[in-house]
Image (cartoon, helix red, strand yellow):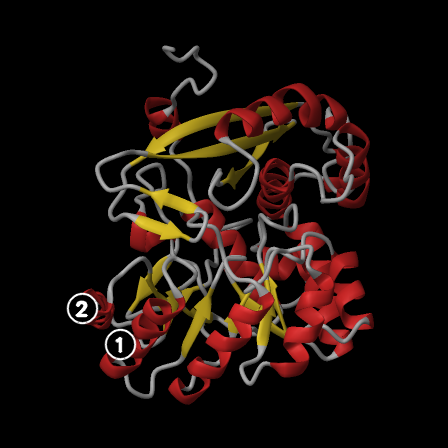
């Protein structure tokens, strides 16, 4: 048994890996995955005196500003040197070191890169202690988390096949990406999902794709469909617009991109500008800050929902541990399995009929085959032809 107080970080390694893509996936900002083209994820291995842990960053330039190249260089050249030699248990100290290396500025400052290292440290701590993250944190309120099937970029005519495919996999809840077309088409897509999935939990996500007037018009048309949440309809920093929309919208407004840091949620709470807070590990820089955000939401009476970033299995497991710790009981958007594969993972997350089982193994509970990781690794910094 390792003594956690004696373990110090001695190595941080990054591996940009090309994972097989199952389906194409788009948001209002552009493509997330493209069928037939590998999906690049950055895996991070943190080592301390013979113990190691793994984390993941999901570069999606269509969603945020971090790319595979920037994540690799940020970790290798800035975050890793800042934390070498630090105690593995000092998660607050690591977070402070991150902020000194890459300052927050107006945003959290490289949240995807920071999240990968932070998650790997949590995995390492759990493995060193021989317990899953719930035991490390002192609580797990649920053993399973229901997933939602994602409907993205479909025309109304195509929605039936997409919903049917989700139902064939056992899914009973659906999330619709909107802001991809004109208002009429967006509403028609949501209406088609409702037609093919009557009574199913249904929520929509605009990924900042609307103006305030357009969002209100769409919300009024979505209410009769029984939509439970309108996720991030406006730009993340449009605090005034989101407050006005919350006052007028007949559909509860959920915030995702607006909540980079727990202090962002505190601002929206003070201004009475939030109905639902989305917990998302990578957006918030890792599990350390995500737990603070979730606790703040609970303490202030804000409903919590869960989401991810089309993560592979490491990111999937991290999110499940977080959501289980806070007992999130509504369906969540952890869509990685729908769109990409994780060939590096041995024993890993079990999903049956749209229900994800929170792993019981130490740390994240995902066994990583490093040989496969190295086989999948690509050099994202290699000069590209002009």
From the viewer's side, name the closer residue of 327 and 244.
244
Earlier along the polypeptide chain: callout 1 or callout 2? 2
Image check: 290 left or right of 36? Answer: right
Identify the disc placed on residue 192.
Answer: 1
Residue bearing mark 2 = 157
Q: Note whether 217 is above or below 54 in the view shown.
A: below
Per the image, label 1 sits on a secondary structure element best described as helix
From the viewer's side, name the closer residue of 348 and 263.
263
From the viewer's side, name the closer residue of 157 and 13.
157
The residue depicted at 63 percent of the width and 26 percent of the height is 74
Residue 341 in sight here? yes
The residue depicted at 55 percent of the width and 60 percent of the height is 321
Per the image, label 2 sits on a secondary structure element best described as helix
Are circles 1 and 2 on residues that touch, CB within 8 Å?
yes
The x, y position of residue 70, in whole percent, is 57, 26
Residue 330 in sight here? no
Residues packed near mark 1 inside 10 Å, few (<14), some (14 to 19) or many (20 plus): some
Quarter of the image where the C terminus is located: top left
Identify the disc placed on residue 108.
Answer: none
């Amino acid at each position: 048994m390792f003594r956690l107080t004696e373990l110090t970080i001695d190595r941080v390694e990054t591996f940009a890996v090309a994972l097989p893509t199952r389906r194409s996936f788009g948001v209002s900002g552009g493509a997330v995955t493209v069928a037939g083209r590998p999906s690049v994820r950055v895996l991070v291995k943190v080592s301390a005196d013979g113990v190691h842990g793994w984390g993941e960053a999901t570069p999606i330039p269509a969603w945020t500003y971090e790319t595979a190249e920037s994540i690799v260089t940020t970790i290798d050249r800035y975050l890793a040197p800042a934390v070498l030699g630090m105690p593995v248990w000092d998660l607050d100290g690591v977070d402070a070191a991150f902020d000194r290396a890459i300052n927050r500025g107006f945003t959290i400052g490289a949240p995807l890169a920071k999240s990968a290292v932070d998650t790997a440290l949590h995995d390492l701590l759990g493995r060193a202690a021989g317990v899953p993250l719930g035991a490390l944190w002192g609580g797990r309120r649920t053993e399973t988390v229901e997933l939602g099937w994602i409907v993205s970029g479909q025309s109304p005519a195509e929605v039936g096949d997409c919903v049917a495919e989700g139902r064939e996999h056992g899914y009973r809840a659906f999330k619709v990406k909107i802001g991809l077309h004109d208002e009429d088409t967006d509403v028609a897509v949501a209406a088609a999902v409702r037609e093919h999935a009557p009574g199913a939990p249904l929520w929509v996500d605009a990924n900042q794709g609307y103006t305030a007037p357009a969002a209100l018009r769409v919300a009024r048309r979505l209410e009769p469909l029984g939509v439970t949440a309108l996720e991030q309809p406006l730009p993340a920093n449009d605090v005034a617009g989101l407050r006005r929309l919350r006052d007028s919208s007949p559909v509860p407004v959920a915030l995702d991109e607006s909540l980079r840091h727990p202090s962002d949620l505190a601002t929206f709470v003070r201004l009475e500008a939030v109905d639902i807070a989305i917990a998302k590990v990578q957006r918030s820089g890792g599990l350390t800050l995500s737990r603070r955000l979730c606790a703040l939401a609970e303490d202030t009476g804000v409903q919590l929902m869960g989401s991810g970033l089309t993560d592979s299995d490491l990111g999937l497991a991290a999110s499940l541990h977080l959501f289980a710790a806070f007992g999130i009981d509504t369906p969540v958007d952890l869509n990685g399995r729908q769109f990409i594969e994780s060939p590096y993972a041995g024993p890993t997350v079990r999903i049956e009929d749209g229900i994800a089982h929170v792993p019981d193994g130490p740390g994240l509970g995902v066994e990583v085959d490093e040989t496969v990781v190295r086989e999948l690794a690509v050099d994202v910094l290699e000069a590209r032809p002009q």
